[in-house]
Image: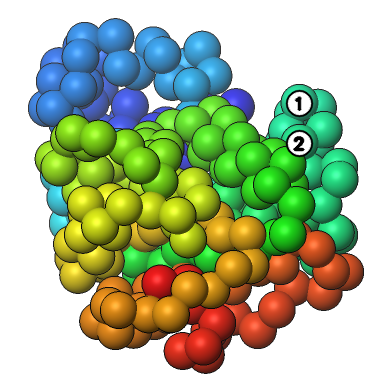
Amino acid sequence: MLPLVIRELESVARAADWSAAVLGERLGFGRSWLSNLRSGRPLSTLALSRISTGFGDRPRVRDLVWHYLTVELPHSAEGTPSEARLLAQLPPAAQRTLQDYVTHFPFEHLAGRGLLLVSRVPRRLSEAARYLVAANEARGVSVLRLLPRAEGADRHSVLATHLLLVERFDEATPAVRDLVYERLLIHRPVVATVTGAHPSSDAPDLRRALRGATDRVSLDTSTSASPRLSSSETPE
């Protein structure tokens, strides 16, 4: 179903005698943007941002952007069977936390909030990471997956992507940690996975930034841990 805010933009375009291609171009997208939405492609965070910037002075458009985020998006984020399979081996509380994060990602993105996923079982970390990539990308969110010892990671891509997912952050090189810290400083969401090993910290600024910008989620227990991390729990 076409989001109500897009239907309203179509009405605005008709009143202004714009074609669908002109509407897409005025928002900075290609000529086929609207037809892609009609075929079922979800609204991306970038699209919502550009709609709010370009048409936010129209009360009805502004209200319908909010309606999409609070009503339409949650109902469209039930997930696919493949997404459900990735979550199947995780505790119910962790499943709900990950699903809620995907559902409300536009809000998390604006707030710069991320997750710290903790497990003693590497496979659970991998499945949770795969779920977050698949579920977010299916909803138009760009996700950059960064390995702990990645060499030559593109700084612009790390800072610009909607969501940065760093696997096995407890094994990350100083270069990777520096990139994560730079992203945290500009309040962009980071999801990091760790095995539960917490080496001694030699970067207290990074520890504080990560603690303040992530919610800790245990993938090993039936109850997710406290959203806020103590300094001794944050991997450095």
Q: Position of residue 207 (x, y in %)?
A: 36, 79
Quadrant into which the N terminus falls: top right
Residue plotted at (71% across, 67% down): 218
Picture coordinates of residue 109, whole percent (x, y): 37, 58
Query: Considering only vertical position in the picture, is 121 above or below 217?
Result: above
Q: Are marks 2 and 1 in contact (CB under 8 Å)?
A: yes
Question: Toward which corner of the image does residue 134 lie, by quadrant?
Answer: top right
- Check disc 2 and report the residue beneath it: 86
Dot 1 crowding, Cα within 10 Å, few <14, some 14–19, many 20+: few
Q: Is residue 14 left or right of residue 18?
A: right
Residue 222 in the figure: left or right of residue 208: right
The residue at the point 24 percent across, 44 percent down is 158
Q: Amino acid at mark 2?
A: Leu
SS assignment at label 2: helix
- Marking on residue 226: none
Q: Amino acid at mark 1?
A: Ser
For marks 2 and 1, give the CA distance: 7 Å
Residue shown at 73%/41% (left/top)? 123
Left or right relative to 96: residue 233: left
Instruction: Give the answer, above or below, for where 71 lies relative to 212.
Output: above
Tag on residue 82? 1
**Which colour assignment does the render follow?**
rainbow
Q: Nearer the viewer, residue 113 or 185?
A: 185
On-image quarter of the C terminus: bottom left
Q: Of 39 and 155, which appears nearest the observer?
A: 155
